[in-house]
Amino acid sequence: MSYQDRDKHGMYKGEGAAPGPLMRHGPGPGLMGADTLMGNDVFNKDGEDLGDIQEIMLDMRNGKVSYAVMSFGGFLGIGDKLFAVPWNALTLDTENKRFTLDVAKERLEGAPGFNQDCWPDMADQSWAQQIHDYYGTRPYSDDSKL
């Protein structure tokens, strides 16, 4: 299901009138409602379905999105493994109304994950570094050191 399908407030109404990354009607893909992103599909560049976004994690110290929690595997929501994917590892595909993650399906199967009953301490810096190392990204906190 795409973000347009979940738009209960009409934020993306008229979006088709101005296609592309700089839409003139509603928030567009440059500024989006977090609730409309929940459940969005995530595919890799090979077109393989990797899962969908279950939650969006905000860093309350700096107001930035840190992670998208993505589900993968299982059947009808049972046995799904959850993954915290760094937000900057995801790309919004406005044409297909989904996200792209540049990771092979086999690599994702071996990614550090967790189950819904045992979430990691995502504020732990060593845990965060492990996640960023796995996906080849840098934490936002590193951006201020440039």
Image: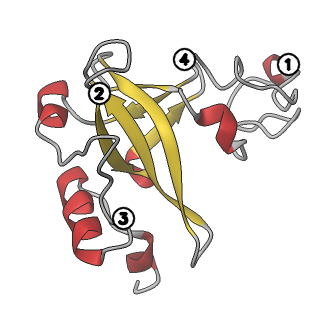
From the viewer's perspective, is the residue at label 3 or at label 4 nearer?
A: 3
Residue 72 image point, x, y percent:
29, 27
In the orientation shown, which residue stands out farthest toward the front?
117
Q: Are marks 3 and 2 in contact (CB under 8 Å)?
A: no
Q: Which residue is mark 2?
A: 80
**Three-letter code for the amino acid on which mark 4 is drawn:** Asn
Q: Which residue is mark 4?
A: 96
In the rendered view, would you say 39 is above or below 30? Answer: above
Q: Which residue is mark 3?
A: 122
Q: CA distance from mark 4 to mark 2?
A: 24 Å
Q: Quadrant of the C terminus?
A: bottom left
Q: Are marks 4 and 2 in contact (CB under 8 Å)?
A: no
Is 144 positioned to the left or the right of 82 in the image?
right
Nearer the N terminus, badge 3 or badge 2?
2
Circle 2 Cα neighbour tier, 10 Å, few/some/many (<14 / 14–19 / ≥20) = some
**Three-letter code for the amino acid on which mark 2 is drawn:** Asp
In the rendered view, would you say 16 is above or below 126? Answer: above
From the viewer's perspective, is the residue at label 3 or at label 1 nearer?
A: 3
For the point 13% across and 35% down, the residue is: 107
Q: CA distance from mark 3 to mark 1?
A: 40 Å
Residue 79 image point, x, y percent:
25, 24
The quadrant in which residue 28 appears is top right
Q: CA distance from mark 3 to mark 4?
A: 30 Å
